[in-house]
Amino acid sequence: MDTASTLLNTPLHDLHLSLGARMVPFAGYSMPVQYPEGILKEHLHTRAAAGLFDVSHMGQVTLVPRSGRVEDAALALERLVPVDVLGIAPGRQRYGVFTNEAGGILDDLMIVNRGDHLFLVVNASRKHEDVAHLRAALSDVCDITLIEDHALIALQGPKAEAALAALWPEAAGMRFMDARPATLEGAACFVTRSGYSGEDGYEISVPADAAERLCRALLANPDVHPVGLGARDSLRLESGLCLYGNDIDEGISPVEAALEWAMQKVRRTDGARAGGFPGADRILGELQSGAQRRRIGLKTEGRAPVRGGVALFADAEGRQPVGTVTSGGFGPSVDAPVAMGLIDSAHAATGTALFAEVRGKYLPVTVCALPFIPARFKR
């Protein structure tokens, strides 16, 4: 269990305290769960304007090919992910997953082609395991470094473009999944047009000693408010995005997780570079024949949310278990409870009626399509 004496601070810790944040332990760090405005208002402000998030606890990793050819780093990384890494153009990024030999997901990540090397962003709870995994498999080709002198911030929402463009006009010319270097408030930064809220926005890697200065410059814009982990979670849940350790883990395959879109044709059966990643036999088989389980959306009746870990049944008496809620809560933008679950594929069709066991009662829920709100990325 995290304790105050063992928690790490991000480079923005003092800023959070000055803004009145309520700090909580998360993935070994002291992180802001909310600010005085509160989770509900922070969530809705991000959907309407722009929210600023500290995600410095995430892992930033570089893969530098010893040959000097980024293609060599890309092909090496394809040993570990069912993703077309070689096809990522310079200045672009792509979502991916690390898989294990059983076909489960070790972590999900973003992969950026920086022209002469690859840049990865991995989950905070897995970053040290991910780096060890990369070094064990790819050290023959790449030098692998966990960047520890940079913060990472996310600026998300429909007014994020205008807010960042006021400091750096080139921001307006980027499209979803573009990535490029930028000088912001005098600091050499790296910007991607991406995020995990379902909104348009950016993630910015910034030197630790310049992070607070950049954040204060962004927060000087009245459209930009600080947002904590609480609203970050409700935003990603409404957007149908997975949280590692809840909706995906080492026992859940990418096909079960409904992440087929993240596995390009070139890595599938009959593709030019088919297979060659851990768990390929299972994953390629499920792509062709389907998986026994499926991640789905759930709508509940009434106002009470169903939380992660709640059992799901096909009958109102709890005799026929079909799966489990993986993430659940209240969706401020849809003004209703929202949840995701992992259930038997036989019951995964949209509109299927199920029952969630909550404190001994069986509450009716309905399988629905994801996401709960449409994504608003700039294509």
Image: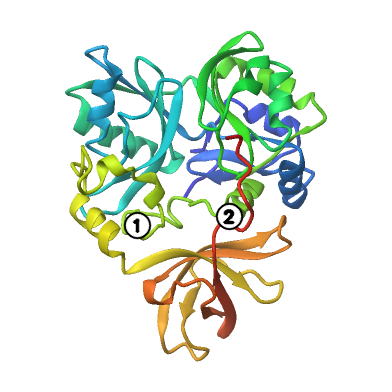
Numbered badge on residue 255: 1
Q: Is residue 224 visible?
A: yes
**Between residues 240 and 229, which one lies in front from this camera angle?**
240
Q: Residue at x 21, y 38 (%)?
A: 273
Farthest residue, direction top: 186
Q: How many marks?
A: 2
Residue placed at 78% from the left, 48% from the top? 41
Q: Position of residue 254 (x, y in %)?
A: 35, 53
Q: Which residue is mark 2?
A: 237
Q: Mark 2 to mark 1: distance in Å?
A: 19 Å
Can you say whether 323 is above or below 327 in the image? Answer: below
The circle drawn on residue 346 is none
Visible in this render: residue 306?
A: no
Q: Position of residue 298 (x, y in %)?
A: 56, 68
What crowding class fits label 2: few (fewer than 14 Cα within 10 Å), some (14-19), or many (20 or more)? many
Looking at the rendering, in which quadrant would you find the C terminus? Answer: top right
Q: Residue at x 57, y 28 (%)?
A: 175
- Which of disc 1 and disc 2 is earlier in sequence? 2
Q: Residue at x 55, y 45 (%)?
A: 25
Name the spot of residue 91 as percent of width and height, x first.
Answer: 45, 21
Residue 57 at x, y = what percent?
Answer: 51, 34
Residue depth check, mark 2 versus mark 1: number of the one nearer the observer: 1
Packing grade of label 1 (10 A; few <14, some 14-19, many >=20) is many
Nearer to the camera, 129 or 182: 182
Q: Quick check: 94 above or below 278?
A: above
Toward which corner of the image does residue 113 lie, by quadrant? Answer: top left
Task: Assign a secondary structure to mark 2.
Answer: helix
Give the residue type that dot 2 points to.
Leu
Task: Specify the color scheme.
Answer: rainbow
Hey, what amino acid is under mark 1?
Val
Q: Is residue 253 left or right of residue 313?
A: left
